[in-house]
Image: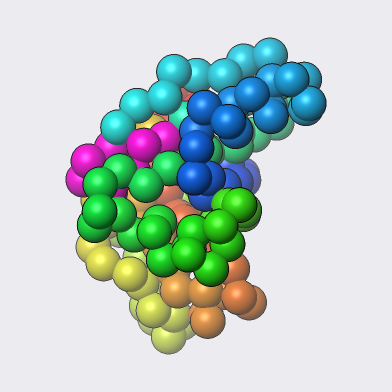
Amino acid sequence: MKLGRLNHVGVATPSIEASIALYHDVMGAEVIREPFDLPAQGVKVCFVDTPNSQIELIEPLGEGSPIHGFLAKNPAGGQHHLCYEVPDIHEAKAWFEAKGAKVLGEPRIGAHGTPIFFVHPKDMGGVLTEIMETPRDGH
């Protein structure tokens, strides 16, 4: 397996709209994508472009959202995960499992429309880590 570039930093937020204002008004972000619902993941997401990566704003979608637990511990929100690209999602999953890392579920389609999976933070130095297949369009 070959680890690719950092695709995005996931930031959980109780309000995407408030976070958009923060990134635009305080941080000076110029390209903020339209928020959209991702029901399969239980979240609403919005991507903020930076010169070399993206910030993925994540808001809970519905009562069963996995983000609720994180926001209960971090009511103002905060860094949720890091996402790295790999050329082949299935090769990467086999790699992590062979190393003894706990892969959380099977690969599924993520917010960029490409396959993803997460690796448990206890096996990644305390950081919830998303692994995604490199998008064809470069985002």
Residue at image location 36% in from the left, 37% down from the top? 44
Left or right of 132, for residue 122: right
Q: How is the image coloured?
A: rainbow
Is residue 46 highlighted in magenta? no
Could you say which quadrant of the image residue 45 lies in?
A: top left
Residue 17 percent across, percent down from the top left: 52, 27
Residue at image location 74% in from the left, 20% down from the top? 25
Is residue 40 highlighted in magenta? yes
Left or right of 26, for residue 8: left
Q: Is residue 66 above or below residue 13?
A: below
Residue 55 visible? The answer is yes
Q: Is residue 48 above or below residue 7?
A: above
Most foreground residue, 44 or 133: 44
Residue 42 percent across, percent down from the top left: 27, 48
Q: Is residue 56 above or below residue 63?
A: above
In the rendered structure, which segment of residues is drawn in magenta?
Answer: 38-45
Residue 114 visible? The answer is no
Residue 123 percent across, percent down from the top left: 52, 80
Most extreme residue toward the top is 30
Most foreground residue, 29 or 92: 29
Residue at image location 37% in from the left, 47% down from the top? 60
Could you say which quadrant of the image residue 96 lies in?
A: bottom left
Residue at image location 68% in from the left, 28% down from the top? 23
Q: Is residue 124 above or below residue 3?
A: below
Residue 83 percent across, percent down from the top left: 53, 50
